[in-house]
Image (cartoon, helix red, strand yellow):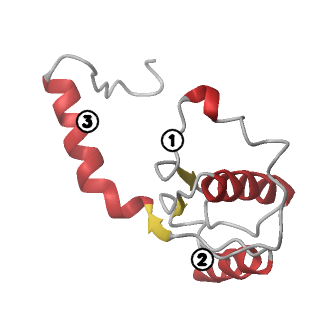
């Protein structure tokens, strides 16, 4: 992770401790959809995720939610990376939701087979 200046974590140091956070084991995820530019809400979420990961000597994953290809552009991905870097937020890893489609499909099939989920293909009009 990129080092920020001398940010003072003293007023938020115990926020995750009550949730069982352990030094070196905190992994956070910031999952924007690359269908537009980052806005103030994205920035707030990315900063919280980055700083909690940093505070606990963990990792922050930028997971681009690329599940709607009709709205997504590489221009937005590049812009997001540039904007985050401007804020000194450098993720430890960059992943894409589509990287995990096979794994997600396998989990869904297992949950259905185990009786913990079901799939319904009832037409919308009938529902």
10 Å neighbourhood of mark 2: few (<14), some, or many (≥20)?
some
- The mark closer to the camera, 2 or 1, is 1
Q: Quadrant of the N terminus?
A: bottom right
Badge 3 local density, few (<14 within 10 Å), some, or many (20+)?
A: some
In depth, the one of 108 and 58 nearer the eye is: 58
Residue at position x 59%, y 51% from top? 56
Relative image position of residue 125 (x, y in whole percent): 48, 24
Whole-percent x and y of residue 11? 85, 42
Q: Nearer the viewer, mark 3 or mark 1?
A: 1
Residue 110 versus residue 122 in the image, above or below: below
Which residue is label 2 attached to?
A: 73
Residue 108's disc is 3
Alpha carbon separation for disc pair 3 and 2: 28 Å
Rendering quarter of residue 112: top left
| Viewer-proximal residue among 107 and 121 | 107
**Mark 1 neighbour density, 10 Å: few (under 14) some (14–19) many (20 or more):** few
Q: Residue at x 39, y 27 (%)?
A: 123
């Amino acid at each position: 992770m990129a080092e920020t200046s001398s940010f003072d974590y003293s007023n938020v140091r115990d926020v995750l401790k009550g949730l069982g956070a352990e030094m070196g084991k905190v992994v956070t995820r910031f999952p924007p959809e690359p269908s537009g530019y980052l806005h103030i809400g994205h920035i707030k979420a990315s900063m919280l995720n980055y700083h909690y990961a940093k505070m606990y000597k963990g990792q922050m994953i930028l997971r681009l939610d690329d599940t709607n290809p009709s709205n997504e552009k590489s221009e937005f991905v590049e812009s997001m990376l540039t904007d985050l870097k401007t804020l000194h937020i450098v993720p430890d890893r960059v992943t894409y939701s589509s990287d995990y489609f096979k794994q997600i499909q396998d989990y869904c099939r297992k949950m259905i087979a185990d009786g913990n989920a079901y799939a319904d293909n009832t037409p919308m009009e009938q529902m």
